[in-house]
């Protein structure tokens, strides 16, 4: 559904000067940082949000603009990547110059519980959006949020030439989206690129991904509000970077004259155990006293080790990750302690929440 308060052609920049971004997944971790970046660069930013029974735009609070504001540049429209006609209408009316496709059922473990839904959103959602661009006959650049989960069982280091072997319904759905993006580039000449992003985290990371689950628990354990932290596989190796740096990489990918596919990663490995150790030791706690194993957090097929080689992005985009996983753990623990303090001082936490 398109916002009736969209600016009209009158008084808007000439066609070649327009910088209008359309972001799916704008309410997510990456979408919120990307929207901030694009607004700071002078873009008009349009995002789709899902209808929910409660407010779901919390991550956009800092940049939210009242619909009645005269000169706003952030526009939110109801939409869903399972709803093709809504996507066509939105793309036709907004006529974006850049499309960032971030919306997905993005949780790997959950994708084993809801594989068909994950295929619908994370896989077919991409072709619906690509077809909407074609149907609306809009000239735009397209970014696909591809993932290191494509490599799955293929051992590290992984770069743009490494063969894919996804290990989850999520990874398989993302593989479909990866190749659809390549296919629309080759078939229709669309400026369509894949960013193959390794794990990236932040204080805005969803609470059920392992890093945020750990850092929230550390804050609560340090405050005496929680006693245990149940985790699955501690041996998995990941290449964790800092999300705000990665959205800058997304933008740079779309500024290239030619569309292409790029790995964004730090190149530095750490195990889940390493991250746990760093997070607990940041507040002077010994993790082994608190962390317990629960097999429900293991996956039917695990991805053992992902370590990216970001050389191509460094050379061609001038992009380099600068925050390592140890610093990331500290940033996230500090933010969760602050957030808990704010909640406690606002008395918004339930005291029986232990
Ligand atoms: P999040 O899970 O934080 O955000 C996902 C976004 O997609 C949310 O805005 C969510 O909306 C939206 N969404 C989900 N389903 C639909 C739907 N059916 N229609 C419309 N919107 C929908 O993910 P991240 O920000 O972490 O990741 C962004 C993208 O990058 C995802 O595609 C993810 O798979 C991919 N990726 C992420 C990596 C990472 O380490 N973070 C690494 C590599 C790839 P709502 O808020 O309503 O739930
Ligand atoms: P991942 O992220 O699957 O890499 O996908 P997640 O944080 O969920 O898992 C990372 C590793 O930690 C292990 N693990 C646990 N994971 C969770 N969620 N909860 C636990 O309790 C737990 N215990 C151990 C997992 O087994 C895994 O090995 C993320 C998502 O953002 C994807 O969308 C994205 O594509 C990839 O990163 C790159």
Image (spheres, rainbow, N blue to C red):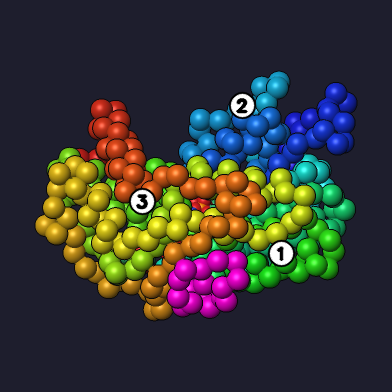
Q: Is residue 354 above or below residue 154?
A: above
| Residue 234 locus on image (x, y percent) | 27, 66
Extreme top residue here? 70
Which residue is pictured at 70% across the width and 22% down the height? 71
Q: Which residue, given by chain and number where applicable, does mark 2 sit on?
A: 66
Instruction: Between label 2 and label 1, give the one nearer the viewer.
Output: 1
Q: Quadrant of residue 160?
A: bottom right
Which residue is pictured at 85% across the width and 23% down the height? 11
Q: Which residue, given by chain and number where applicable, does mark 1 sit on?
A: 181
In this view, the residue in front, 170 or 314, is: 314
The reply to whether discs 2 and 1 touch (Cβ–Cβ < 8 Å) is: no
Using the numbered discs, state the Cα–Cα distance from disc 2 to disc 1 in whole angstroms: 34 Å
Q: Is mark 3 within 8 Å of ligand 2?
A: no
Instruction: Between label 1 and label 3, give the one nearer the viewer.
Output: 3
Q: Quadrant of residue 313?
A: bottom right
Using the numbered discs, state the Cα–Cα distance from disc 2 to disc 3 in whole angstroms: 37 Å
Q: Is residue 84 above or below residue 283?
A: below
Extreme front residue here? 315
Which residue is pictured at 44% across the width and 51% down the height? 241
N-terminal of the pair, mark 2 or mark 3, is 2
What is the magenta range? 151-166
Q: Is residue 180 above or below residue 144?
A: below
Query: What secondary structure is found at the residue carrying circle 2?
Result: loop
In this view, the residue in front, 9 or 193, is: 193
Q: Which mark is residue 325?
A: 3
| Residue 218 locus on image (x, y percent) | 23, 47
Answer whether residue 1 is visible to the viewer in this image: no
């Amino acid at each position: 559904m398109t916002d009736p308060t969209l600016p009209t052609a009158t008084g808007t920049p000439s066609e070649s000067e327009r910088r209008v971004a359309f972001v799916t997944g704008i309410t997510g971790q990456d979408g919120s940082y990307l929207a901030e970046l694009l607004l700071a660069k002078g873009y008009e930013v349009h995002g789709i949000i899902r209808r929910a029974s409660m407010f779901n735009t919390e991550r956009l609070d800092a940049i939210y603009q009242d619909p009645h504001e005269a000169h706003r540049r952030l526009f939110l429209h109801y939409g869903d990547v399972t709803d093709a006609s809504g996507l066509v209408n939105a793309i036709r009316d907004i006529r974006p110059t850049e499309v960032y496709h971030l919306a997905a059922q993005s949780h790997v473990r959950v994708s084993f519980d809801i594989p068909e839904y994950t295929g619908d959103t994370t896989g077919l959602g991409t072709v619906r959006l690509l077809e909407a661009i074609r149907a609306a006959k809009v000239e735009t650049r397209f970014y696909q949020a591809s993932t290191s989960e494509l490599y799955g069982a293929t051992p590290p280091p992984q770069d743009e030439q490494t063969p894919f072997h996804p290990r989850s319904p999520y990874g398989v759905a993302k593989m479909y989206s990866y190749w659809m993006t390549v296919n629309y580039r080759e078939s229709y000449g669309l400026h369509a690129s894949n960013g193959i992003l390794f794990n990236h985290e932040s204080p805005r990371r969803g609470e059920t991904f392992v890093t945020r689950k750990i850092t929230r628990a550390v804050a609560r354990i340090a405050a005496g509000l929680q006693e245990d932290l149940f985790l699955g596989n501690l041996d998995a190796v990941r290449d964790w970077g800092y999300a705000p740096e990665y959205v800058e990489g997304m933008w740079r990918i779309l500024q290239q004259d030619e569309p292409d596919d790029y790995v964004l990663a730090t190149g530095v490995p750490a195990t889940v155990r390493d991250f746990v150790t760093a997070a607990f030791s940041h507040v002077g706690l010994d993790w082994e006293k608190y962390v317990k194993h629960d097999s429900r957090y293991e996956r039917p097929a695990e991805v053992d080790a992902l370590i990216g080689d970001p050389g191509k992005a460094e050379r061609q985009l001038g992009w380099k990750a600068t925050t390592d996983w140890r610093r990331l753990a500290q940033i996230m623990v500090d933010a969760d302690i602050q957030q808990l303090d704010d909640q406690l001082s606002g008395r918004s936490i339930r005291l029986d929440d232990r």
